Amino acid sequence: MPSAKLKQRVMFSPEDMIALVADVEKYPDFISLISALRITQKNTASETRETFEAEAVVAFKFLSETFRSKVDIDHDAKRISVKKADRSGAVKSLSNDWVFYELSDGSTLIDFAVDVRLKAFPLEM
C-alpha cells in the first residue's frame, strides 16, 4: 500500500476525534479489511498520555493475516502515533500519525499520514 496523507476539517472537537480514533476495537465495524481487532497490552503513562499494543486481523478473500501495532496517544499534544510492534506478523513496516488542530470555530483540522507495507502482496493491493 502506498503512503497517504490527508488534511481534513471536521465539525467535531479534537477530544472527540481522539476518542474516535483511539477506540481501535471498533475498527472492524467500519473498516472492511479488518475482520478483528483487540487491545493486547495497555499502559497509562500519565493522565494525558496512554500507550497500548493492539492485534488486528486483516482479511481479503482467502487470505487472512495478523499484525500488532503500538499506539501512543498524547492528549496534550493532540496526537496519536501508531508504529509496527516487534512481533508484527503481516506488516513489514508501519508509520501512522494523526494530529488534531483545534480551530477558532470549535472545529478540528485533522492532519493524517500513513505508510504501511504488508508482507502478503494481495493485501498490499
Image (cartoon, rainbow, N blue to C red):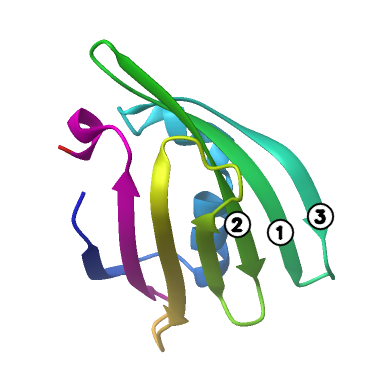
Q: Is residue 45 above or below residue 91?
A: below
Type of amino acid under label 3: Asn
Residue wearing tag 1: 51
Residue wearing tag 2: 71
Quarter residue 95 falls in: bottom left
Say whether residue 105 is magenta: no
Residues at marks 1 and 3 touching, judged by CB atoms closer than 8 Å: yes
Closer to the camera in the image, 102 or 92: 92
Q: Earlier in the sequence, mark 1 or mark 3?
A: 3
Type of amino acid under label 1: Thr
Judged from the image, the secondary structure of the residue bearing numbered disc 2 is strand
Residue 43: which numbered mark, if any?
3
Residue 113: which numbered mark, if any?
none
Q: Main secondary structure of the magenta part?
A: strand
Residues at marks 2 and 1 touching, judged by CB atoms closer than 8 Å: yes
Q: Earlier in the sequence, mark 2 or mark 3?
A: 3
Please report the bounds of the magenta region as a residue range: 107-124
Residue 120, image x, y percentages: 28, 32
Q: Is residue 5 above or below residue 22?
A: below
